[in-house]
């Protein structure tokens, strides 16, 4: 029984609000920071193209074929997750939640408890999903990356990348960062553009963003169709504000609109998501895919009695989730 | 043989609170990297130039079938029958002697060649 209720027997009145511990929400979902591929139950093929075109001298006779029409298929099957616990509302009988229980010993259902406490579980589930989406690795991927020999070339795993995967939360899916480092489907190092970083502080944050920016492929920075985002960990918000305060009269600062809550580096919007520390991603939104069956699954909580001859109840969330990075070679991963 | 081993009670979170390094996922390369970038110091580690023996593998728990009522004794019996170390064999023989002895205990059976040697 997992209802932990530090209860005060009610004698007077109770303040209306029940305040949750989580004061922010799943930004990735709420603000649409990535692309959502819904209605994916299993075995869905994502296809990327990367062509090589070779211009040659015109000849009027039969020409020689030259170039590559490159097509890559990735098979994606989201993992199915469950959040489940049991509780008994009889524990609420002497607390504040007894006020809306109907008369009669049989009646122990509190709609206030359902509305304020149980519905408050959804943000926790949603944030757990968001963290799993960005940050984490499967046991198999951890073993595979640990067996690689680190090196400087982009075709090798970096030492920092190897350390990240070893220390990443073990999960049912590879998060976006891990997906960029290692392509588990083809058992090869990911084709991301690698930028070796360092420990980021409020003092060096502008310099380190500069390394990410200059390390990114030019075609991404010049993309007129879709402006790239810089995805950064939450801690960077405070560091950027501190940096700007310390460099108020200089021109090389981040562009920040405190009222609108927008942050920019060299014209690129910075989006704060649950990335690990000392990690940033420069990518176009259409390349980072949140694969699921239905995003609203994260808002649907099932609350029922366990069985008819007892008063124990359960809550349950069920949802599908997988991360996918398309055209990884155009996406830049900074890790230090 | 690993050169670096985290000291008792020391864990590292090189990429923030959600990352975790213990002796189970630590390698010499990781330790040297963390020291070089200043996210750990040599004080965090026991360092042996000869190398520490590898940590024993964790038991694989998810392949053990759940114990069902009434099956526990059966499992124990199977395990005892499969003991193949000299100690296990002798213990078994002792039990056999005590159950069947009258006045004069039977001499112990000689150790046969089928007992595998004990490896470190």
Image (cartoon, grey):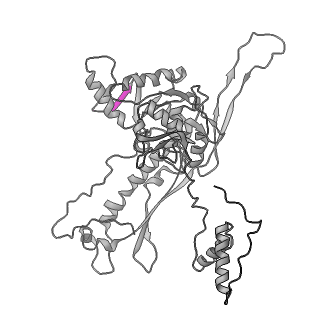
Does A27 sit left or right of A81 as displayed?
Answer: left
Q: Is residue A196 above or below residue A96?
A: above
Q: Nearer the viewer, residue A283 or B76?
A: B76
Q: Is residue A34 above or below residue A155?
A: below
Quadrant (top left, top right, bottom left, bottom right) of the N terminus of chain A = bottom left
Q: Is residue A158 above or below residue B91?
A: above
Note whether residue A239 is visible: yes
Does A300 sit left or right of A41 as displayed?
Answer: left
The residue at the far right in this view is A61
The part of the chain drawn in magenta is A259-264
Does A303 sit left or right of B105 as displayed?
Answer: left
Q: Nearer the viewer, residue A137 or A111?
A: A137
Position in image of residue A86 (x %, y %): 42, 68
Does A302 sit left or right of A139 as displayed?
Answer: left
Is B4 part of what is drawn in magenta? Answer: no
Position in image of residue A192 (x %, y %): 56, 30
Note whether residue A36 is visible: no
Position in image of residue A260 (x %, y %): 30, 33
Q: Nearer the viewer, residue A306 or A297?
A: A306
Position in image of residue A182 (x %, y %): 59, 37
Say which quarter of the image contains residue A117: bottom left
Say which quarter of the image contains residue A73: top right
């Amino acid at each position: 029984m997992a209802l932990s209720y530090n209860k005060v027997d009610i004698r007077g009145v109770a303040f209306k609000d029940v305040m949750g511990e989580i004061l922010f929400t799943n930004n990735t979902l709420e603000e649409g920071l990535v692309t959502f591929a819904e209605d994916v139950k299993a075995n869905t093929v994502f296809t990327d193209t990367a062509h090589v075109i070779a211009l040659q001298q015109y000849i009027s006779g039969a020409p020689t074929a030259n170039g590559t029409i490159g097509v890559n298929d990735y098979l994606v099957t989201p993992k199915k997750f469950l959040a489940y616990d049991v509780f008994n509302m009889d524990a609420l009988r002497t607390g504040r939640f007894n006020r809306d229980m109907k008369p009669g010993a049989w009646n122990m259902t509190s709609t206030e408890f359902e509305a304020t406490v149980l519905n408050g579980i959804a943000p926790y589930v949603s944030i757990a999903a968001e963290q799993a989406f960005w940050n984490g690795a499967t046991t198999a991927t951890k073993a595979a990356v640990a067996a690689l020999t680190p090196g400087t070339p982009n075709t090798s795993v970096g030492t920092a990348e190897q350390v990240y995967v070893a220390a990443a939360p073990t999960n049912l899916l590879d998060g976006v960062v891990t997906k960029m480092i290692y392509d588990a489907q083809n058992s090869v190092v990911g084709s991301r553009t690698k930028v070796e970083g360092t420990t980021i502080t409020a003092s060096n944050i502008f310099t380190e963003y500069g390394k990410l920016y200059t390390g990114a492929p030019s075609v991404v920075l010049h993309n007129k169709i879709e402006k790239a985002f810089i995805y950064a960990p939450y801690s960077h918000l405070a560091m950027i504000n501190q940096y700007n305060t310390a460099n108020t009269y200089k021109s090389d600062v981040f562009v920040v609109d405190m009222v609108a809550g927008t942050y920019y580096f060299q014209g690129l919007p910075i989006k704060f998501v649950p990335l690990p520390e000392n990690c940033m991603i420069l990518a176009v939104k259409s390349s980072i895919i949140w694969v699921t069956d239905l995003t609203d699954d994260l808002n649907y909580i099932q609350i029922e009695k366990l069985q008819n001859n007892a008063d124990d109840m359960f809550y349950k969330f069920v949802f599908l989730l997988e991360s996918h990075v398309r055209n990884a070679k155009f996406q830049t991963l900074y890790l230090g | 043989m690993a050169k670096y081993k985290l000291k008792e009670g020391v864990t590292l979170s090189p990429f923030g609170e959600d990352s975790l390094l213990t002796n189970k996922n630590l390698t010499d390369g990781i330790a040297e990297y963390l020291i070089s970038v200043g996210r750990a110091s040599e004080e965090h580690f026991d360092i042996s130039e000869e190398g520490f023996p590898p940590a024993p593998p964790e038991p694989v728990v998810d392949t053990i079938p759940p114990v069902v009522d009434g099956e526990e004794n059966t499992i124990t019996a199977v395990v005892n029958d499969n003991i193949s170390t000299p100690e296990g064999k002798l213990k078994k023989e002792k039990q056999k002697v005590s159950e069947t002895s009258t006045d004069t205990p039977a001499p112990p059976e000689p150790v046969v060649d089928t007992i595998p040697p004990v490896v470190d």
